Image (tube, rainbow, N blue to C red):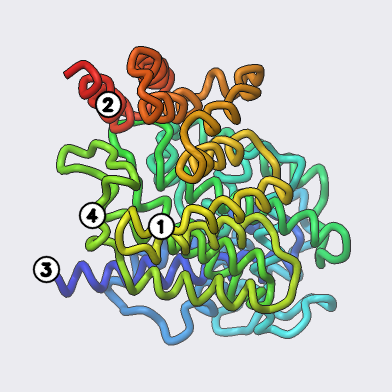
Amino acid sequence: MRTQVEADSRIVEAVREAAPQVLSTLLARYRQFEACEDAVQEALLAATVQWPEQGIPDNPRAWLITVASRRLADQWHSDQARRRREATAVALDAPGERVAPAPDEGPPDRDDSLMLLFLCCHPDLSPASQMALTLRAFGGLTTAEIARALLTPEATVAQRISRAKQRIRSAGIQYPVSGEMYTSRLQVVLHVLYLIFNEGYASTSGPDLVRGELTREAMRLTRTVHRLLPDDGEVSGLLALMLLTDARSPSRTAPDGTLIPLAEQDRSRWSQQVIGEGVALITRALGSGGPIGQYQLQAAIAAVHAEAPRLQDTDWRQILALYELLEKTASNPMITLSRAVTVAMVRGPEEGLAMLAPLDGDKRMRDHHRFHAVRGHLLEMAGDLTAARASYAAAERLTSSEPEQRYLARRTARLDS
């Protein structure tokens, strides 16, 4: 049984590893996102059916390209409105023949995966659509798998993907991406991968705090980007951040799934191997002499936490300096919230609470459970237990995450005892 499970796992890994390369190859030739993506999905399905019986091909990518190309040929044969493509379709459909490259295709082994990821993260798409399309086209997940991962109805995910394809079709496919478009798109790409990871690491709703299928997929996709852009500091920073954060996963929940905060975690359960990889990545990125961005700074903060064997060994002053630099680099209320906690650890809870006061005027923060949870924590540190109870209760009402609800309820109960 274990051998079969391992074989199935290898097939899933091989399919998802090849999926973006296959789709990007077809897109580079034919520039029709929807048709190519549908053909690739059919090829991936064929692989999951045939490979368990026939074994994984020596060249999974070439196998999938051939099958997907034939699916395109079948589609174009049946579409009388596209007769002008029939000559290409006949060539594609001929058994054993190599697909003839288009004049601008480039080398047959060229990897256009990064271009595909840029396409999935088109800035005109909503973040929800970017996430769904990235997981579908670049990650190789089915619509049903995406729906389960995002805790979203399958019909909603299908609609988002369909609308995203329509938007891309109307905007047109631009290959290659370069210049200013490259810079702006890369930031969107990293943000989408960051969102996917965060949704897996701290689920915003549902019974589970951690959804490993999302964190693993986010890290796999980020590794792919890192392979394509090994010298980009922010790509390295994002991968390091994910690794250093995920290394704490075994100690983040109690047996009943309740959240265990960083201060109370059993650090002996943190994965030292993963921490070592993350620290090495961020050390190289920061030492490269390139510009330092938000993901590198967040990874550096995570590294300081990870390298402290006990909570009391944490270098809070170094973390505070990094947060101050982070706030100058990418200021947002959530960063201010985290800096307030660090200020409280260095200078006392009163100064941390003073930093939170301006956030009261931000409706986004007033409606976010984490703002009230942090304020409750700082009020508890300051000894104002009545106000702390009220803040914890407000946070519990605002979160849809069942593990966080249980954690906040226990914090309140502890104050009452």
Q: Amino acid at mark 1?
A: Thr
Residue 86 image point, x, y percent: 74, 64
- Mark 1–mark 4 Cα distance, whole angstroms, equals 15 Å
Residue assigned mark 1: 314
Is residue 102 depicted above or below 211 in this figure?
A: below
Residue assigned mark 2: 411
Q: Determine the residue positioned at 40% across, 38% down.
A: 203
Mark earlier in primary sequence (4, 2): 4
Residue 325 image point, x, y percent: 68, 53
- Mark 2–mark 1 Cα distance, whole angstroms, equals 23 Å
| Corner quadrant of residue 414 | top left
- Mark 4–mark 3 Cα distance, whole angstroms, equals 33 Å
Q: Amino acid at mark 3?
A: Met
- Mark 4–mark 2 Cα distance, whole angstroms, equals 19 Å
Q: Amino acid at mark 4?
A: Asp
Label at residue 1:
3
Please state which of residues 23 and 115 is positioned toward the viewer in this rendering. Answer: 115
| Corner quadrant of residue 131 | top right
Is residue 326 depicted above or below 109 in this figure?
A: above
Mark earlier in primary sequence (2, 3): 3
Residue assigned mark 4: 266
- Closest to the camera, between mark 2 and mark 3, is 2
